[in-house]
Image: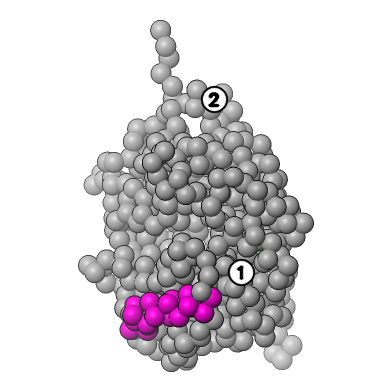
Amino acid sequence: MTVARKKVAVVCATFNNDRSAKPDRYWLQPQSGLQIASQIDRERYDVTLHHEMWHGLYGVDDVPAVDLVFLTGLQRDFDRQRQLAYLFKRKGAVTVAGGSICTLFPDFAAEFFDAVCAGGVDSVPDVMRDFAHGQLRRLYISAPTSISDYRVDYRLLGEAGIGGQLHLVEASRGCDFACSFCTVPAERARHTTFGVDRVLAMIDDAIDSSPWWSMKRRYPIVSFIDNNFANDGPYTRELCAALRRHPRLKGWGALVTQDILRDHDLIEQMAGAKCRILFTGIESLDPAFLKANNKRQNVKYADTLFEDVAFARRRGIVVVYGYLFDPRVTTTAEMTAQAEELARIEVLTYPSYFSFIAPLLGTRLFWDSAERGEMRPHLRLRDLDGTTIAYHGGRDSDEELSRFAETVFRHTNRLVSRRRLVLKSLRMSWQTRRGHLVDHAVLLNANLRVMHEMHIASRGVHRNYLGGADILDPSYSWFPPDISPEDRRRYFDPILITDGESRLQPWLERYRPAARRALRVRPDPTG
Ligand code: SF4
């Protein structure tokens, strides 16, 4: 008699930017679920992968009955992880959670799940061992700099029906920079590499697991999803040499810091290694923004940015970037002017997306903002998604901020028309007059990417984009009618960051760094 394998679900919990529940089949899908599922023994367990972004959000009765579920997500998705924890527990599952909130605030996170993984995804083998023995611990910690030895099983994506035209691969994790708004330094995730041989094996595995007729098999392009691909110069050069020789790889792209564009030798080598697109941390051309957010690497090379971007373009690399707005230091009139000006800068593609700066929990920006009382009253963790305004006290009224956000995310074509972006792409293609048809397609796609949010925005969801006051996602009310008041509060009320007077909620006060606590109690010398 064969014994049925226990069922394990790995779920990437996701809230949509437009606060609807519909699927978003954009190619850049979360990767933590794949990394978790790849570390579970499939001979012994029946493993399934579910991306709420790709498949849509689970309804109240849709969650499968499994023995164990891993729930992962970004900071803004933590409430969704809690909601799913309730729904899965209701069907008898043991719940394990990971992600940024679990890493930075593990004992707080442990209030909602049977076990919490702090650090990276490398605790999974320990969790599975203890689960098999019925001895699950409350907390698992893996060093943010550790990358354990496991093989990524890309077949899981195909089995789950998750597509996309690009192979998503990691060559490293972490970053040694210290941008004030970023969770990577807050989590002390220093840059750590996978090693060239392992990266090449991942690329081959990803290609081999794609359908034989697919673009991913016929014309394989890799998007490296590292936080900072070129953080380690010698490793980057070694990897580029190997990518250049890779017989099947047709092209690749990666995320790099802006200062890398200044290293023309490296850009030359990347181009020779089939690099076609670099997503850079340009983030803003506004000196006030760069200074306020400690983007030292950008300030240092600001004068040569256009020259460096043009150099990369001449080598066949398209430089793309997201553009951040900080309503504390910039008015809506200035932000509108910047968005319009960006369309006129010939050498730069238009930003791939716009985003408002968000005080992600645990970052230096967050603790600074808390000290200054800058965050909006009743701000919720859910609001830290880049489309919602988290600050008050700027020079604009709430109505002006709300109207500007609606223009950016719902009516992007009022800032810049599609026709203008197509013409911009044609002009940029003409300037270089080189490259494969694919290069020009990459350029056109990069310029038009900004329209994505507008296209997927649900017309039926009416947002005001103001933290603490915006509409919540429908899943906040997706619970069964017989839920107890205690469970409803615990799993379905949004996690609050500030109270009605913009002070931190008590659960966060206990994490305030000791040095900052000392500052808070220091007597006022003028008092
Ligand atoms: S360079 Fe990028 S990954 Fe590194 S700290 Fe800055 S924002 Fe974060």
Q: Is 425 positioned to the left or the right of 109 in the image?
A: left
Question: Which badge, 1 or 2, is on the more N-terminal residue?
Answer: 2
**Nearest the camera: 482 or 474?**
474
Q: Is mark 2 within 8 Å of ligand 1?
A: no
| Magenta region, residue range | 414-432
Q: Which residue is mark 1?
A: 315
Foreground tag (1 vs 2): 1
> Looking at the image, which residue is at 65% across and 48% down?
245
Q: Is the Cβ of the residue at disc 1 closer than 8 Å to that at disc 2?
A: no
Q: Which residue reaches farthest top?
A: 1
Could you tell me how far apart the alpha carbons at marks 1 and 2 are, in whole angstroms? 53 Å
Q: Quadrant of the C terminus?
A: bottom right
Taking depth in this image into account, of 490 and 65 the one nearest to the observer is 65
> Is 47 included in the stretch rendered in magenta?
no
Q: Amino acid at mark 1?
A: Arg
Ligand 1 quadrant?
Answer: bottom right
Tell me the residue at 28%/45% (across/down). Answer: 60
Residue at the limit of the structure toward the front, as seen here: 433
Residue 402 rendering spot, x and y as whole percentages = 36, 81
- In screen coordinates, is 248 left or right of 88? right
| Residue type, label 2 | Ala
Say which quarter of the image contains residue 509: bottom right
Residue that appears at 69% across and 77% down: 296
Q: Position of residue 377 (x, y in %)?
A: 45, 75
Q: Which mark is residue 371?
A: none
Location of mark 2 (residue): 132
Per the image, label 1 sits on a secondary structure element best described as: loop
Secondary structure under tag 2 reads: helix
Colour scheme = one colour
